[in-house]
């Protein structure tokens, strides 16, 4: 093993410097306040969980889990997502009265990366879970809240792509017959490798009609017109029911007035095995990956409680990347003072702090490059000698 450099960090770990931290804090606060206004209550769970419970239930690949042992020899994991821990808490403590529960969270999660991956192994998610309600209205509320949260954060151009687990799965089973044969096609779709998907479909021993149905799947993108197109390629069964749910969802989103941000994409699949219905991804400029995703899932049943839920998570690091160039509100005032007017400066700062304003005190003799330092602030006050000059 090679010697580590003094400033080297573990693979995938990142430092957050003050300017970026402040931007993240502002965005987190705005989104959190929006979630609270919609009736979602924040919850915290431990960073460490048991491998046999959360690790097994999370649907994150085993090689991506950070594992360690406690003093009793139990295998623990750093939480790889927040959905599984919240499902654990909900099943044990929150669903006894069998009522809908709205929860929110903002937390760091941990997923080990391959050396060539280049992605963070620790990142922050902010999201919600709407538990113990299985109506399409519930799915519509979470998508509408997601859109409202992103708009409040200052993101103007983005799209929520909506699909349904049941549609693609039913189409694959009708044509291919086995889940094993369908797995390869799902992998191409999850990786957005549409060229590979088409080549694989064309290599299959199928009728030209069935090949065409499979090729049409990843072209089912757009507005309400996609509903009719999807019905043309699916036979009776789960696939039809999935389209009925998507039609109902579209009506709900129109009532919220957010349909302009939504497009159907029936080729969406997820590597999370617990998704069971409507699912969605959020895309924005400047970012090559979804900045958030969510959907309906049945994970709570793994913890002994029969209940479904829906929710979403937004990656704060990717949202910040999408907001690159958007000027966030940051009014900072600096009070420069000399020794003889120090008390006056302290009193002014205290007054501004009492008004909720950001005010920094700076001894003028401690700054070597005054021009560079003042550029950090929107306003300055100089209390030097016997005069006041703003």
Image: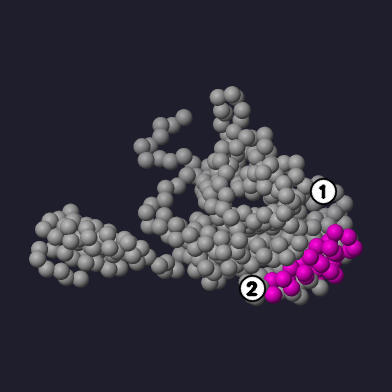
Query: Which element carries disc 1, helix, strand or loop?
Result: helix
Q: Residue farthest to the left?
A: 386
Residue 17 placement, left or right of 70? left
What's the residue at 21%, 67% (across, down)? 381
Task: Tell me: 177 left or right of 146.
Answer: right
Packing grade of label 2 (10 A; few <14, some 14-19, many >=20) is: some
Q: Which residues are magenta?
A: 229-255
Residue 154 shows in this picture: yes
Q: Residue at x 74, y 68 (%)?
A: 249
Q: Quadrant of the C terminus?
A: bottom left
Mark on residue 179? 1
- Name the element at disc 2: loop
Residue 363: percent from left, percent from top: 18, 56
Q: Among all residues in the image, which is located at the extreme top?
A: 72
Residue 208 visible to an observer of this rendering: no
Image mark for residue 258: 2
Residue name at image x 80 percent, y 51 percent:
182
The tag earlier along the polypeptide, 1 or 2, is: 1
Query: Badge 1: how crowded within 10 Å, few (<14), some, or many (20+)?
Result: few
Q: CA distance from mark 1 to mark 2?
A: 36 Å
Instruction: Specify whether residue 17 is painted magenta.
Output: no
Q: Residue furthest front?
A: 97
Quarter assignment of residue 369: bottom left
Q: Left or right: where does residue 168 sit relative to residue 360? A: right
């Amino acid at each position: 093993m090679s010697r580590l450099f003094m400033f080297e960090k573990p693979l995938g770990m990142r430092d957050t410097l003050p300017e970026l931290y402040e931007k993240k804090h502002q965005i987190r606060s705005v989104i959190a306040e929006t979630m609270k206004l919609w009736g979602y209550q924040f919850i915290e769970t431990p960073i460490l969980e048991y491998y046999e419970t959360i690790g097994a239930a999370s649907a994150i690949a085993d090689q991506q889990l950070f594992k360690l042992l406690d003093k009793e020899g139990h295998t623990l994991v750093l939480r790889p997502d927040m959905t599984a821990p919240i499902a654990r808490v909900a099943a044990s403590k929150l669903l006894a009265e069998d009522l809908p529960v709205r929860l929110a969270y903002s937390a760091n999660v941990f997923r080990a990366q391959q050396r060539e991956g280049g992605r963070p192994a620790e990142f922050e998610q902010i999201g919600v879970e709407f538990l113990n309600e299985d109506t399409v209205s519930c799915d519509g509320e979470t998508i509408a809240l997601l859109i409202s949260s992103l708009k409040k954060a200052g993101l103007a151009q983005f799209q929520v792509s909506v699909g349904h687990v049941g549609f693609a799965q039913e189409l694959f089973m009708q044509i291919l017959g086995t889940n094993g044969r369908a797995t390869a096609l799902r992998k191409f779709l999850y990786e957005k490798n549409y060229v590979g998907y088409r080549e694989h479909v064309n290599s299959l021993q199928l009728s030209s009609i069935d090949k065409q149905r499979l090729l049409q799947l990843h072209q089912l993108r757009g507005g309400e017109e996609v509903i009719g197109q999807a019905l043309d390629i699916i036979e009776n069964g789960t696939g039809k029911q999935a389209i009925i749910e998507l039609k109902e969802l579209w009506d709900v989103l129109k009532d919220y007035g957010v349909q302009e941000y939504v497009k159907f994409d029936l080729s969406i699949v997820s590597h999370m095995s617990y998704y069971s219905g409507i699912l969605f991804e959020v895309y924005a400029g400047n970012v090559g990956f979804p900045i958030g995703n969510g959907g309906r899932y049945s994970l709570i049943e793994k913890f002994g409680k029969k209940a479904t839920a829906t929710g979403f998570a937004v990656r704060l690091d990717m949202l910040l990347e999408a907001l690159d160039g958007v000027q966030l509100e940051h009014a900072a005032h600096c009070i420069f003072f000399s020794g003889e007017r120090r008390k006056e400066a302290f009193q002014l700062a205290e007054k501004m702090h009492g008004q909720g304003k950001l005010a920094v005190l700076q001894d003028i003799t401690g700054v070597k490059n005054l021009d560079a330092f003042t550029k950090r602030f929107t306003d300055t006050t100089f209390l030097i000698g016997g005069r006041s000059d703003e």
